[in-house]
Each structure stands twice: as structure tokens, then as C-alpha cells.
Amino acid sequence: MSKDDVLFLFSLTVLFPAIAALVRFRKADRSYYPFLIFVIISLLNELLVRYALHPSDRDARTLNWQVFNLVETVLILLQFYYWKVFDRYKKWFYVLLGLTAGGWILENLVLSSIFKFNSVFLIARSFVIVLLSVQTINHIIVHQSMTPLTRNAMFIICVALVIYFIYNIFVFTLQAKGISKTNKDLMIRVFDIMVYVNAFSNIIYGIAVCLVPEKFSRKNLFSDQGWKN
């Protein structure tokens, strides 16, 4: 079995949350729809890269990766919007969306090439997602309902996002500093660890999807979790 085969098997851990999302989608509370769509798209993208994009076609793979990063970021921001994180300051959600799209276009299409590694967008969006996740975690802990944290899908998703995107910040910062050229062995080990971090996050996502509450009739999910004071 080649290294690419092993990496693909680890990436297929996203199959767990994606299948769970497909099974539970119709009954799941709509406030989790962006996240459910995100894990489904993640699985489809893994299959696309594996079976439709040839390993030697680096431009096609890089283009796919760049577009997926944008889609991923927008869906995660939408998820926080659906969770009413921006309820008091809705304009900031639209500001973040505009900065996300504008920053991605500026870096990948104007200042550089979409077929190159561009670090600013990747690092910036990772910081934003981590900050939003930590804010949500703190709010859930302070305004905790009767549901244990270990069964709170929102809490579990945010923990997984923090783990994954903090490591993203570390990896992309090393790349931005040119470590991949000066110390290739270090970067190889860093990327090997990233495979495990991604797989671990996917497993946590799967657990969270299984715990996503079902639709409530005329009931605001967040009123129970105390988002609004």
C-alpha cells in the first residue's frame, strides 16, 4: 500500500460524519444545516481529488484546494450565523463574509496566482474560526443547560474546530516562513501529524452529528442554551 493510499484512508474518516449527516439531515434541527452540508461536501471533495484529479496535475489539485478552502470558510461562518453568534451584531457577519470573499479574491487572483500557496487567507480565516469557536464554547459553559457538554453537539463541533484550525495556523505559518524549503524533513513530519489531526477532527465531527438535536416545532434551540440574555 502506497503512502497516498494510506493518506486517502485517513481522509476517509470524513465518511463517518458525512453518512451520519445524510441519514439525519431531514430530521436534524435546521440550525445545523451549514455544518451538515460542510461534512457532506468534504466527503465529495475527497472522492473528487482521489478519483477525478490525477496526482501529477498539480494545477488542478491546487485550484480545487483553493476553492474548497473558500467554500469551507463560508459554510463555517454561516454555521456560526445560524447559531446566532452574530445575533447582536449582524453587520459583522456580512463584514466577515465580505472580507472572506474579498481577501480570497485579492490574494489568489490579484496579488498572486490561484495555483500557488498563499498563506494570508488561510491563516486569517483559521484565526477567525478559532476565535468564534472559543467564544461559543465560553458561552455554552457559562449559560449551560441541563444537557451535559459531552452530549452538546454545538460544544463538540467547536472543540473540533479549535483543534483543527489551531494546527492549521501552526502549519501554514511554518510554510509562510519558508520552512518547507529550508527544512523539508520537519515539514514532512508536520504534514504527517496533520493527517492524524484531520482524522481525529472528522471522528469528533461524526460524534457531534449523531448528537445534533432533531427539529423542534416552534421552539428556538438557543433559548435553552441561553444565547440571548
Image (cartoon, rainbow, N blue to C red):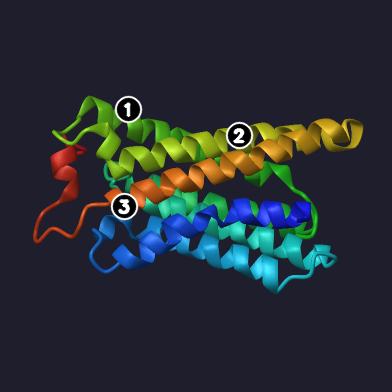
Instruction: Characterize the local packing of mark 3: few (<14), some (14-19) or many (20 or more) Cα atoms within 10 angstroms.
Output: some
Could you tell me how far apart the alpha carbons at marks 3 and 1 are, in whole angstroms? Answer: 22 Å
Which residue is pictured at 89% across the width and 37% down the height?
181
Instruction: Characterize the local packing of mark 1: few (<14), some (14-19) or many (20 or more) Cα atoms within 10 angstroms.
Output: few
N-terminal of the pair, mark 2 or mark 3, is 2
Residue 2 percent location from the top left of the image: 78, 55
Q: Check whether the beta carbons of the residues at disc 2 and disc 3 lie within 8 A of each other.
A: no
Q: Amino acid at mark 2?
A: Tyr
Q: Give the residue number, with chain letter if any, for mark 3.
A: 210
Q: Describe residue 217's horizontal placement relative to residue 168 as left or right.
A: left
Question: Which mark is nearer the camera, 1 or 2?
Answer: 2
> The C terminus lies in which quarter of the figure?
top left
Where on the picture, by quarter, is residue 4? bottom right
Q: Residue furthest bottom?
A: 52
Residue 91 seen by the camera:
no
Residue 82 or residue 150, whichever sits in front: 150
Which residue is pictured at 67% across the width and 59% down the height?
65
Residue 159 percent location from the top left of the image: 42, 35
Q: Residue furthest top?
A: 142
N-terminal of the pair, mark 1 or mark 2, is 1
Q: Check whether the beta carbons of the residues at disc 3 and disc 1 lie within 8 A of each other.
A: no
Where on the picture, by quarter, is residue 28? bottom left
Where on the picture, by quarter, is residue 29? bottom left
Q: Amino acid at mark 1?
A: Asn
Residue 81 or residue 133, whichever sits in front: 133
On residue 138, the disc is 1
Residue 37 percent location from the top left of the image: 42, 63
On residue 167, the disc is 2
Helix, strand or loop under label 1: helix
